[in-house]
Image (tube, rainbow, N blue to C red):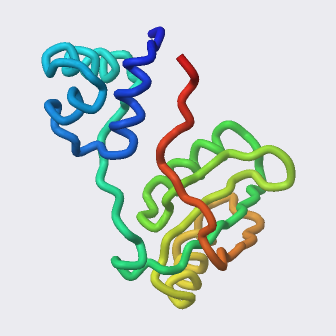
């Protein structure tokens, strides 16, 4: 789907506030409501807009510990990677999981309440996953930047 300037304005507004009504969105992007809704539906159908979410404050939910964990596996086989990915997808504290290149096989980010919860997560939920060989943790001291809106191309 080729995006024009209006599509990009719609995306920018929805990335900033996904709860906008169609009428308010149309006003902000200088369209009438009907064509605006048609464009949003087209963006959804094309997979450009994949879903709408509410972003919760982790500290307000008691999840003030943000930890990145590098995990190396004993085997790099397709089956071992698939088995690990399936098990890690079942872990609620895991916010993100990336297959990496270089020294580490996977990088995950977990949101937890405290060090005791991190210890429990590593010892009781991560270490027992078959094939896990090495685990390295990195703590965040301060969140310098966090954004959910993707950079949009120029029209």
In the rendered image of this protein, does residue 120 appear above or below residue 19?
Answer: below
User: Residue 79 or 144: which is nearer the viewer?
Assistant: 144
Q: Give percent across and percent down for residue 20.
A: 22, 41
Q: Which quarter of the rendered picture does the N terminus lie within? A: top left
**Residue 111 image offset from top left, x and y in percent:** 49, 71
x 29%, y 43%: residue: 18
Which quarter of the picture shows residue 38?
Answer: top left
Residue 54 image position (x, y, % from top left): 29, 54
Please tell me which residue is depicted at 39% across the width and 27% down the height of the picture. 9
- 13 up-or-down from 111: above or below: above
- Give the side of residue 45 with respect to residue 150, left or right: left
Residue at the far top: name it: 2
Is residue 61 depicted above or below 81 in this figure? below
User: In the rendering, at what x and y percent does residue 150 appear?
Assistant: 52, 38
Choose top left, top right, bottom left or bottom right for residue 39: top left
Name which residue lies at 19% across and 21% down: 37
Direction from residue 9 to residue 103 in the image, left or right = right
Q: How many marks?
A: 0
At x 68%, y 45%, the residue is: 99
Farthest residue, direction right: 103
Residue lying farthest bottom? 116
Residue 62 falls left or right of residue 138: left
Left or right side of 30 for 97: right
């Amino acid at each position: 789907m080729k995006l024009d300037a209006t599509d990009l304005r719609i995306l920018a507004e929805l990335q900033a506030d996904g709860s906008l009504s169609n009428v308010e969105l149309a006003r902000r992007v200088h369209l009438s409501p009907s064509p605006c809704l048609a464009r949003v539906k087209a963006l959804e159908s094309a997979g450009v807009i994949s879903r709408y979410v509410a972003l919760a404050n982790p500290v307000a939910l008691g999840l003030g510990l943000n930890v990145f964990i590098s995990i190396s596996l004993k085997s790099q086989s397709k089956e071992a990677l698939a088995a690990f990915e399936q098990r890690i997808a079942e872990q609620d504290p895991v916010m993100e999981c990336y297959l990496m290149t270089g020294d580490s096989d996977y990088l995950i980010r977990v949101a937890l309440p405290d060090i005791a919860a991190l210890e429990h997560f590593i010892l009781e939920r991560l270490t027992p996953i078959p094939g896990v060989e090495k685990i390295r943790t990195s703590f965040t001291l301060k969140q310098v930047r966090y954004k959910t809106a993707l950079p949009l191309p120029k029209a």
